Image (cartoon, rainbow, N blue to C red):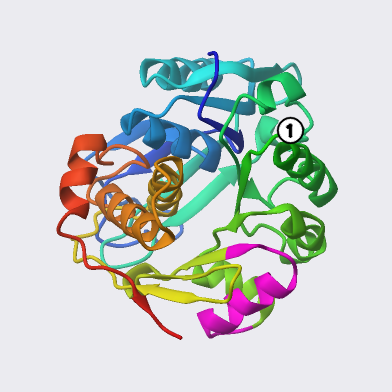
Amino acid sequence: MENPDVLCVGLVVADLVCAPIRRFPDAGGLETTDRLELSIGGCASNVAVDLTKLNVAVEVVGRIGNDALGEYVRKAMSEQGVGGSYLSVSTTSQTAATQVVNVAGEDRRFIHAVGANAELTGLEVPDDVLKQAKIIYVGGFGLNAALSGKNVADLFRRAREFGVLTVLDVVIGEPTLIREMLPDALPETDFFLPNRDEAKVLTGFDDPVEQANEFRRLGAANVVVTLGEGGSLLLNQAGRLLQMPPLQVVQVDGTGGGDAFAAGFMYGLLKKEPLARCLQFGTTLGASCVRATGATTSVYRENELIEAVATCPAPVSAN
């Protein structure tokens, strides 16, 4: 794909998602579900698919295995219009996969095989591709030691030299690893997008405002902390704090909600909208995601998003 608007670098996963079950089975027990569905997963691929639904041109930079799940991921992304020119194939590792278990009334559970994602370094993006983009997004930072803080800092530094916005999202695997990686990457990050639980692990603070301030202290230009049922907040580089109320939606499966928020927020950035409007886009797209099982299944398309945002409450300034 020539001239992608966004490069999505990071986790590419095949998800096996169950419709909500009544209870988690005991050892040796069995619980039935209405359906099990194979779908695209992983931060980079989820965000890429969500962006294509918004008519954004996207390339994924990731790694898959030479196996049936890898072929499924490649084909499924291609059918959604996601570019896969920089989706490389491992000869030694399987495609990363996640079993997503949804229990009625409880948060979802994950069983994950890291697979080929562990071989991605972030240095696979050449300058001639990087300079064509408007935004580079790294998703799932912290789960893979090879995608190190220094490598992401190098990638983001080169991107900024070409005038490309840098967006960083995280996954908490081993907390010590990501705490060591983050200080290298954040000073080259234009927008950092953790959720409240991730931010608590990384900072030790319960208060999302304190969390955001700590990430700003570590070098991030702008910080968005998503709060689940509490909405979200944004602390910009000038120190202005915006708080976004949540949207009322019946949650069926929370998988991919944060990725959809990131896609909606970046859609606003691409449209050069004010940051308050970007929060509305992110919140609305995130809410649309959780209405059905699967990380991208029910995410709004562009016309649906624009229509929904027109009735979305506005963020309020908190300082």
> In the rendered image, which residue does mark 1 sit on?
120
Q: Nearer the viewer, residue 77 or 244?
A: 244
Report if residue 80 lies within the magenta region.
no
What residue span does the magenta drawing correspond to?
A: 205-222
Report if residue 221 lies within the magenta region.
yes
Work out whether 143 lies above or below 66: below
Residue at x 38% of width, y 31% of height: 38
How many discs mark residues in the rendered view?
Answer: 1
How far across and how far down the image is residue 167, in percent? 59, 49
Q: Quadrant of residue 46?
A: top left
Q: Quadrant of residue 312?
A: bottom left
Q: Residues within 10 Å of mark 1 (few under 14, many from 20)?
A: many
**Observer able to see residue 301:** no
Work out whether 16 lies above or below 66: below
How far across and how far down the image is residue 301, in percent? 25, 35
How far across and how far down the image is residue 32, in percent? 26, 47
Residue at x 23% of width, y 65% of height: 247
**Observer able to see residue 216:** yes
* Disc 1 residue type (three-letter): Leu
Left or right: 28 as drawn, with respect to 127: left
Q: Nearer the viewer, residue 106 or 310?
A: 310
How far across and how far down the image is residue 180, in percent? 82, 63
Work out whether 193 lies above or below 166: below
Left or right: 283 as drawn, with respect to 179: left
Secondary structure of the residue carrying numbered label 1: loop
Residue at x 73% of width, y 59% of height: 186
Q: Nearer the viewer, residue 297 or 151?
A: 151
Work out whether 238 lies above or below 122: below
